[in-house]
Amino acid sequence: MRSLILVVEDEAPIREMVRFAAERAGFAVAETGDAERALVEVADRRPDLVLVDWMLPSMSGVELARRLKNNDSTRSLPVIMLTARGEEDDRVRGLESGADDYITKPFSPRELIARIKAVLRRYRPHDDDAAVVCDDLSLDPVNHRVTAKDAVLDMGPTEFRLLHFFMTHPDRVYSRDQLLDQVWGQNVYVDERTVDVHIRRLRKALDVHGHDRYIQTVRGSGYRFSSKG
């Protein structure tokens, strides 16, 4: 699954340049020119990294970075600041706001992509991209593929994230609230019944080869993933 970069920049030409460079490097890109809208996008899209301009119309990039880093649910979201300010005091201020890196305009697309990859590496353990296997069920996070008995299973992105979480946390019972926090994110407000809907969809996708039995309902507690009976 491609990493999603949220670009928060009010100058359209710069947004287009960043989008072109990031997509060419294999990233998915969402964009907005407004900091308030960026907060909505973070909640809805759950990006892997935010690239934010210092000077924005409604709220500065510094304030946006500060809000993201002061919120428990987005504290671990990497932020790179884009700015025309090159003085040392400005760089320090940007980093003190919580930004993980700082790029001064003008910058080359090559430098930008190198900085993005470097910051993402800091936040991601190497085994995040490792395939997860349980018996003959395998999940590949890099290629966003689930196979059972060498057959590729068809499932949506939410079911994929749900299965990935279950397979990396086997034999533990999780309540609906815990699954909402871990899979959807703490700042996404959806009904608990949403979990049940996606559990049903996940079971249907796994049912092709009988692997739906791995998704177990624990009455009064929630759900768990286990290959045991």
Image: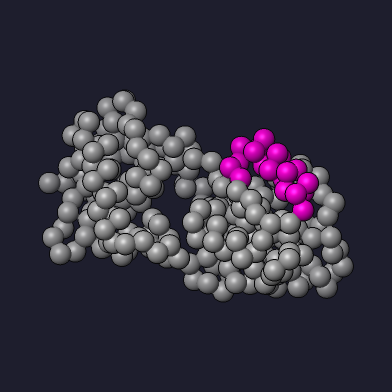
What residue is drawn where x is 65% and y is 64%?
35
What residue is drawn where x is 64% and y is 38%?
23
- The scheme the figure's colours follow is one colour
Q: Quadrant of residue 194?
A: bottom left
Q: Is residue 29 visible?
A: yes
Q: Quadrant of residue 113?
A: top right
226 lies left or right of 6: left
Q: Is residue 98 above or below residue 124?
A: below
39 lies left or right of 108: left
Q: Position of residue 87 (x, y in %)?
A: 87, 67
Q: Position of residue 152 (x, y in %)?
A: 34, 28
- Magenta residue span: 11-29
Q: Position of residue 220 (x, y in %)?
A: 15, 64
The question of residue 73 being in magenta is answered with no
What residue is drawn where x is 52% and y is 65%?
74
Q: Is residue 122 visible?
A: no
Q: Is residue 69 above or below residue 44?
A: below
20 lies left or right of 201: right
Q: Nearer the viewer, residue 176 or 168?
A: 176
Q: Is residue 26 above or below residue 114?
A: above
Q: Is residue 64 above or below residue 24?
A: below
Label count reads 0
Q: Nearer the viewer, residue 88 or 205?
A: 205
What residue is drawn where x is 64% and y is 51%?
31
The question of residue 17 being in magenta is answered with yes
Q: Main secondary structure of the magenta part?
A: helix
